[in-house]
Amino acid sequence: PSTPIHSATVSAPTNIACIKYWGKASSHYNTPINDSLSLTLDQADLRAVTTASCCKCFTEDKLWLNGKEVQMNASTLKRFRACVDGIRALASDKVDDITHQIVVTRSEWETMPVHIASYNNFPTAAGLASSAAGYAALVASLVALYDAREEYPGQFSAIARQGSGSACRSLYGGFVAWRAGGEREDWSDSIAEPVVDEMHWEEIRAVILVVSNKEKETSSTKGMETSVTTSRLLEYRAKHVVPQRMKEIEKAIQEKDFESFGKVTMMDSNQFHATCLDTYPPIFYMNDVSKSVVTMVHVYNEWAEEIRAAYTFDAGPNAVLYTLEKYQVELLALVLRYYPEVGEGYVNNSELRKEAMEFA
Ligand code: PMV
């Protein structure tokens, strides 16, 4: 019989941080200087779909991204190895082919090179946390392939973290915190954990405005490096601002208090971009369109006399607006009126779109 190819395919969603991760404490372990918190978006069109395969017939490990083979540089290779070796070390003996009763033992997996093929259905590296979905899907596909088991809760997230920091949060649904850790020397306490049940706050919605799908000029790794070494504001933020904000936002989420949730989210996005400006040389992720979205949201909230929408921007100009289900048509109508092109973005509900168009 021919040599079997074992494979598993999974998809993983992106996540958008409300309390931002910016700055590494250890570049070796890829750990942060502060806790962060995000919402994992369950939209079908913001996912990475990844197939992990392995076979004795493969000659070497390989990676494809959106159909093109990736020639891994030192940094990508280190991330890739951390994920593959990390998950493979947790493999169990597995009956991989029920029909032929092929049993693959833990040690056998190590003799087989892996092939990884991943697709993103949204702009790569445009500040929509494509790396979060990508590395989360990589880890999850390997977990499925090797039938890996955690030795402690959060261990898979600690491995995903070594691919891309924010990826550790995409392994869970709903609101997820990434605890910075650092008590343990090997940083095994730098893990993600859900802060509430995935279904806890079902009324939360995210509207994404793709202002630009160009690749960002400053990668998050490079940006964090200069921010950590030059920005005093970042140091202050990590020590004196984020700990309090984490408490506030977790409480707001527990109590489904959108007013507080929205305010903290907007303030934290603003402070993150302020630390970018405080970096030397400065980093500009938001552009004029991004800034006008900020104004639009504040005008809308003032008009409503309450916070109905909250913006947040990652390392790029694209805006993510959080709102509640009952305001999403209203908000979408505003977006479509002022940003007809970017409003196309990610509202994957044609009914809702129709309703908003009429409203606009
Ligand atoms: O995980 P990275 O290295 O792509 O960094 C992500 C940084 C931000 O998206 C700006 C913030 C965050 O917490 O996701």
Image (tube, rainbow, N blue to C red):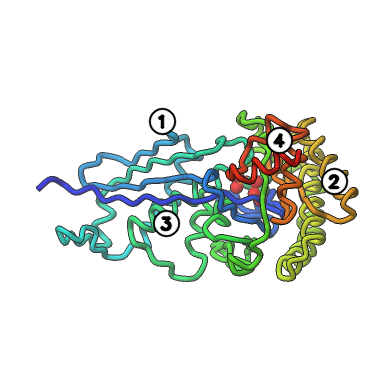
* Quadrant in which residue 91 is drawn: bottom left
On the question of residue 33 being in view, the answer is: yes
Of marks 2 and 1, which one's residue comes earlier in the chain?
1
Q: Which residue is mark 2?
A: 300
- Which sits earlier in the primary sequence, circle 1 or circle 3? 1
Give, as a three-letter code, the residue at label 3. Gly
Task: Please name the amino acid that badge 1 sits on.
Answer: Lys
State which tag comes first along the sequence, 4 or 3: 3
Residue furthest left as drawn = 1
Question: Could you tell me residue 184's position as x and y percent?
Answer: 58, 67
Determine contact: label 4, label 2, CB under 8 Å.
Answer: no
- How many labels were placed on the picture? 4
Separation of disc 2 and disc 3 at Cα? 47 Å
Q: Give the labeled residue for mark 1.
A: 68
Residue 317's tag is 4
Pick the front one: 282 or 39: 39
Q: Indicate the amino acid at tag 4.
A: Pro
Closer to the camera: disc 4 or disc 2? 2
Q: Is residue 199 left or right of residue 33?
A: left
The residue depicted at 78 percent of the width and 50 percent of the height is 309
User: Which residue lies under the disc numbered 3?
Assistant: 86
The foreground one among 317 and 83 is 317
Query: Gap between marks 1 and 4, in whole Å?
Result: 26 Å
Q: Categorize mark 4 by other alpha carbons within 10 Å: few (<14), some (14-19), many (20+).
A: many
Which residue: 78% across, 56% down? 262
